[in-house]
């Protein structure tokens, strides 16, 4: 049996829809336990516990402050609106709670830098809630992408992230309100496209960022849909992405290299929980007479022992345990990855706000 | 047995590599026969006949003029360098030969308009050599794309066309010479991306065209690789494409709609000759808790009785026979399709030449 004292104890700030998925992931992760839930209303927090059949041992708090005051909480998961991230991530880190923060991480990179600074000074782990990084498929794709013989150099990248919410979303959801989440579809869906593109480029920032003029804003000026182009001058590489609340669900990533290419169509959330695939070709060329190809695309199947969100929690908790038990330093790489995405997100938003100018980063 | 007198008799102007594939297609098409081959050198034309095991009955000419003088030639296939299209397509049409013209159709839309004008006045059929339009998979994809319930409105389109030629290509091939084919990868590979994008939009021209600054030119100023963005203002639709001589072979098309989307990765030349597939989803959404999807992508398999290039020849010859035997008017739709591609190709080239400005069409 697992000794409960060795588990990383999570407190959750807010009862957002996504918190249901992450609470389940904390439960599935072998090194983690859900210790406490909080909401601005204690009734809402209690309802959340009942509705999601959480353990009776989970502490329920009627304020985020109260949860942060609980000395048993090792780490917090923060699914609050983006506009509240700075305040609550900083308060949590100041109380030496490790911080698993929903994306987009902040309203701008200045805010994120403040969060990362406090995490650093308080010696706590930071990670954003992008789950797909933790799926073993991602590591397999990276292996292919990094192989100079099979893949060569990255030439162009394409990514989409879209979903079609119900009509009431457009009136009520925080992601449509300028004061709560001014990035809209860009921060919610586009965050993943930006992450996938930067991941393909080993987090090297693009030279330029250009939002295209087909960007659709709602009456609050929040992005509902946009197409964006990136350019890396030295590498002569381009990337484009489309993110939207106006299309049915897509999560495409195609990376095309000098010698190979791959496609995945369910990057952010795999079709199934226990395995995922991607397709690749390497050294593809015309067959004789330009009739057909010398090969067909190949499918790679990758099994995963746990759902990707549980793998995320497991990795986060492994780092937290290293810090707690062995005084290992926090892994700053996760903050660096978030920061790269936030810098690019800010640049895209500035391009939209400037009337679709090309901006140098 | 087929009466040879009822077959459409083809003459081929030039012994380009692609002519080998089209000669085979003429042979495979039940309503067509290869009647004559020509080259500027009669020896080269004779070698072509031998090398490709063509019938001994095929006439061999040492000049294109001589072939056009042959009264038995009903139609010509013109795989000459783009810079020669205007002269030879016009001369052929003036002698009432129907014209199957390799792409890109001309050096600019003015030249193409002259070709189309002569075809119209001489009552001859025009078609460009884009084969993928004729595959039954294309019709099946169009059916899906046109279904308002399954697909909805087109939101964004992405396409690639690339291949990695051997090193000698970059010194010798006509597609690298400004005086022979000033469009380079844009005319050769990009033509297909432009065609696929316009096809998705029912040939409505985009409002704006922007070549992105990562475009790579050779020392002759010919495009070796480029990424391009289109925007349809009224439809709020975007498209991006990548075409290149610097990446291994790809032929991707993804069309994303409000309710459905599809992916094909071998659009221009299917992996196999006798069947082809595409993948689609419609009404995709998150499953409960945002774990997985409500569906997986589905594969549609389409069988074809003949290779797509033979279906192209068959369709062209069907139209020619209609004109010859029944005095049906030539089908101007194929010229309109070519013209739309040429207009957009010209605009992309102008955007490159202007230093990557956004151009209104």
Image: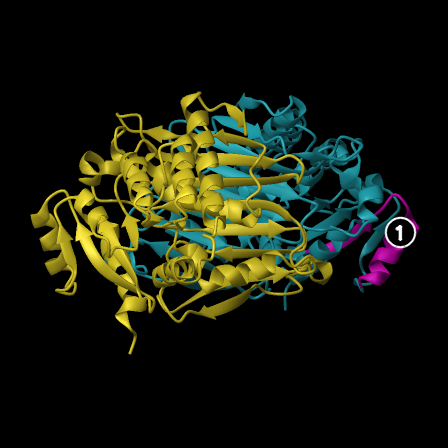
Chain colours: A cyan, B yellow
Chain letter for mark 1:
A
Is any part of residue A194 visible from this angle?
yes
Residue at the image point whose x is 34% and y is 33% from the top: B183
Residue A252 at least partly seen: no
Q: For mark 1, does the 10 Å Cα neighbourhood hold few (<14), some (14 to 19), or many (20 or more) residues?
A: some
**Residue B254 painted magenta:** no
Vertically, is B101 above or below A295? above
**Number of marks in the image?**
1
> Viewed as shown, does residue A335 lie left or right of B196?
right
Q: Position of residue B276 (x, y in %)?
A: 43, 65
Q: In this view, does B10 lie to the left or right of A189?
A: left
Q: Mark 1 — residue?
A: A44
Q: In this view, does B313 lie to the left or right of A201?
A: left
The residue lying toward the viewer, choosing from B280 and A254, is B280
Residue A99, quarter of the rendered image: top right
**Rendering coords of residue A200 (x, y %):** 46, 42
Kindly give the residue lying farthest to the left in the view shown.
B43
Q: Determine whether the residue tagged by mark 1 lies in a helix, strand or loop.
A: helix
On screen, residue A178 versus residue B359, left or right, reads right
Q: In which quarter of the image is the C terminus of chain B?
A: top right
User: Which range of residues does the magenta coloring cover?
Assistant: A33-52
Q: Which residue is drawn at 58% across and 35% down?
A: B231
Residue closest to the eye, A187 or B344: B344
Q: Is residue A16 above or below residue B187?
A: below
What's the residue at 45%, 55% (across, down)?
B133
Image location of residue B301, percent across then percent down: 48, 69
Q: Is residue A286 above or below residue A236?
A: below
Quarter of the image with the N terminus of chain B in it = bottom left
Quadrant for residue A54, please give it.
Answer: bottom right
**Residue B54: quadrant of the picture:** bottom left
Q: Where is residue A167 in the image (x, y as percent from the top left)?
A: 81, 49
């Amino acid at each position: 049996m697992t000794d409960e004292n060795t588990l990383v104890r999570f407190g959750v700030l807010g009862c957002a829809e996504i918190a249901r998925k992450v609470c389940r992931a904390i439960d599935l992760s072998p090194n983690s336990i859900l210790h406490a839930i909080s909401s601005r209303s204690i009734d809402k927090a209690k309802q959340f516990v009942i509705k999601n059949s959480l353990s009776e041992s989970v502490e329920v708090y009627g304020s985020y402050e109260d949860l942060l005051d609980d000395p048993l909480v090792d780490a917090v998961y923060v699914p609050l609106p983006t506009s509240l991230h700075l305040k609550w991530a900083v308060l949590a880190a100041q109380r030496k709670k490790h911080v698993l923060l929903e994306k987009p991480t902040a309203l701008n990179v200045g805010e994120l830098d403040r969060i990362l600074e406090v995490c650093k000074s308080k010696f706590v782990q930071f990670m954003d809630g992008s789950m797909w990084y933790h799926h073993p498929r991602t590591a397999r794709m990276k292996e292919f992408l990094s192989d100079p013989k099979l893949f060569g150099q990255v030439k162009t990248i394409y990514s989409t992230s879209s979903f079609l919410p119900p009509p009431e979303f457009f009136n009520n959801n925080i992601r449509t309100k300028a004061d709560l989440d001014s990035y809209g579809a860009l921060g919610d869906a586009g965050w993943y496209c930006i992450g996938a593109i930067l991941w393909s480029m080993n987090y090297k920032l693009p030279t330029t960022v250009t939002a295209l003029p087909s960007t659709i804003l709602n009456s609050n000026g929040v992005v509902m849909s946009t197409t964006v182009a990136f350019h890396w001058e030295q590498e002569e590489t381009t990337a484009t992405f489309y993110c939207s609340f106006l299309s049915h669900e897509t999560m495409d990533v195609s990376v095309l290299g000098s010698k190979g290419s791959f496609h995945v169509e369910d990057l952010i959330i795999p079709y199934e929980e226990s395995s995922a695939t991607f397709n690749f070709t390497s050294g593809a060329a015309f067959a004789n007479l330009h009739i057909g190809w010398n090969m067909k695309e190949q499918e790679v199947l990758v099994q995963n022992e746990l759902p990707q969100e549980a793998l995320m929690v497991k990795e986060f908790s492994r780092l937290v345990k290293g810090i707690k038990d062995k005084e290992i330093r926090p892994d700053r790489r996760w903050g660096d990855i978030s920061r790269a995405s936030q810098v690019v997100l800010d640049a895209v938003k500035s391009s939209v706000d400037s009337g679709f100018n090309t901006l140098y980063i």
